[in-house]
Image: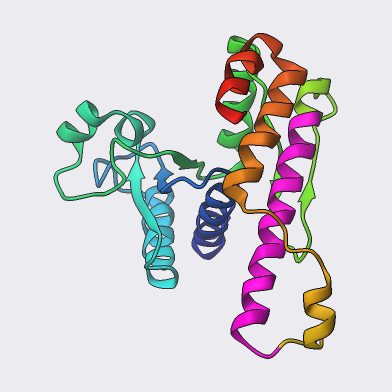
Amino acid sequence: PTPEELASIACASCDTVAALTGWDVRCALLSHSTDGSMDNALVDKVRAARSIANERRPDLKIDGEFQFDAAVRPDVAAKKVRRESEVAGRANLLIWPDINVGNIGVKIIQNLTGADAYGPMLQGFKKIVCDCSRSAPVSEIVGNVVMSCVRAQALAEGEERLCEAAPCALSRSEHTSAPTPPSLSAAWPEALYRLTLYTRPELAFRLGDRVE
């Protein structure tokens, strides 16, 4: 992607993760360089993407360029990042610099750890779109369905707030006739519980105590 596209990916991913989890998202733009340790065109692209993202969405915590360890480990970040950063060492969202490393990274995690990899979740559309790998097991497909439902609910709630804050194309009677979707804070634990019950029943039993 271009720097502009990489910035858009970071911003959209922050919104998606916040909608799914309710986290305080800390987004790291990954690279083979950490905060100027290398200087080449690949690093320049990531730095430019960070600047564009920060200018477009100053409300989001997006920083880089960071190597993976500097993004997720506070002890490494303390050595490599010589400036203040809300993200370094504490990132909970990682943005790969291109599809090559992204695909390779996901396949490594899947095949060496046995983890499920949900998605890809396509972003930037008016409607929710999710893809499934041809090798996806049933548990990944179920996870994609659950997360797509939660994302759709978040989208509906966002449109609801926009209609309340500004004139809406729908009449007031039409707008209020639809049931108000439940809050994400209530819906996501229930959705997560149902997914876990299906894919990891031994974990769902413990999670169920919290949900109930």
On the question of residue 22 being in view, the answer is yes
Quadrant location of the N terminus?
bottom right
| In the image: residue 107, left or right of residue 130 | left
Q: Write down the region rendered in magenta.
A: 142-167
Which one is in front, 112 or 181? 181
Return the x and y of residue 164 as percentages of the image width and height.
Answer: 64, 80
Above or below, 45 against 174 in this view is: above
Quadrant location of the C terminus?
top right
Q: Residue furthest front?
A: 212
| In the image: residue 73, left or right of residue 204 | left
Return the x and y of residue 138 as percentages of the image width and height.
Answer: 83, 22
Magenta highlight: main SS: helix
Return the x and y of residue 167 as percentages of the image width and height.
Answer: 68, 91
46 in magenta: no
Identify which residue is drawn at 52% across, 50% down: 18
Image quadrant assignment for residue 177: bottom right
Return the x and y of residue 8 as percentages of the image width and height.
Answer: 55, 62
On the question of residue 124 being in view, the answer is no
Identify which residue is drawn at 64% across, 14% down: 205
| In the image: residue 76, left or right of residue 41 | left
Above or below, 102 against 15 in this view is: above
| In the image: residue 135, left or right of residue 28 | right
144 in magenta: yes
Chosen colour scheme: rainbow
Above or below, 168 against 147 in this view is: below
Which one is in front, 136 or 153? 153
Identify which residue is drawn at 69% across, 61% down: 155
Which one is in front, 206 or 76? 206
Identify which residue is drawn at 62% across, 87% down: 166
